[in-house]
């Protein structure tokens, strides 16, 4: 079994020798920054979503209260007009 473990360690270190570690660090940094940006957008959306819903409810209530019964562009006839 000792030879199997030595083989696995040798294979792992052989693979690590062929891997560009700077590329992996750059990729990890990009993933972390992208995750932070995504999390920031999610937090902003969670903060503004209730405010936006409250604004929509206010506008809906305002339109119900101040309902305009159709604007008529026709002028009323005066007594001297036909």
Image (cartoon, rainbow, N blue to C red):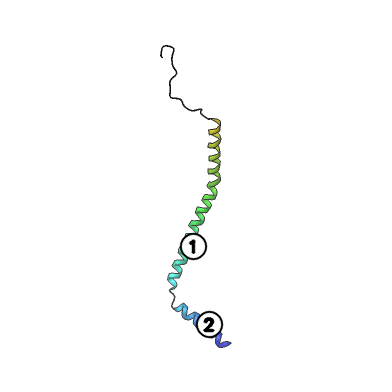
The residue indicated by pointer 1 is: 32
Describe residue 7's horizontal placement relative to residue 22 as left or right: right
Which residue is at 49% across, 56% downward? 38
Q: Secondary structure at mark 1?
A: helix
Foreground residue among 70 and 1: 70
Q: Which mark lies nearer to you, 2 or 1? A: 2
The residue indicated by pointer 2 is: 8
User: Dot 1, crowdedness within 10 Å: few (<14), some or many (≥20)?
Assistant: few
Instruction: Please state the horizontal and vertical placement of residue 39, each as a whole percent of the image.
Output: 51, 56
Which residue is at 52% across, 50% downward? 45
Which residue is at 54% across, 47% downward? 49
Instruction: Please state the horizontal and vertical placement of residue 72, each as a whole percent of the image.
Output: 46, 25
Q: Farthest residue in the left direction?
A: 81
Describe residue 22's horizontal placement relative to residue 54 as left or right: left
User: Dot 2, crowdedness within 10 Å: few (<14), some or many (≥20)?
Assistant: few
Instruction: Please state the horizontal and vertical placement of residue 71, each as a whole percent of the image.
Output: 46, 27
Quarter containing the C terminus: top left
Foreground residue among 53 and 9: 53
Which residue is at 47% across, 81% downward? 14
């Amino acid at each position: 079994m000792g030879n199997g473990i030595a083989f696995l360690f040798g294979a792992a270190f052989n693979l690590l020798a062929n891997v560009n570690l700077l590329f992996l660090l750059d990729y990890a940094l990009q993933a972390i920054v992208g995750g932070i940006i995504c999390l920031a957008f999610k937090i902003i959306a969670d903060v503004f979503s209730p405010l936006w819903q409250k604004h929509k409810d206010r506008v809906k209530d305002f339109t119900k209260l101040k309902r305009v019964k159709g604007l008529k562009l026709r002028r009323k006839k005066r007594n001297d007009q036909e």
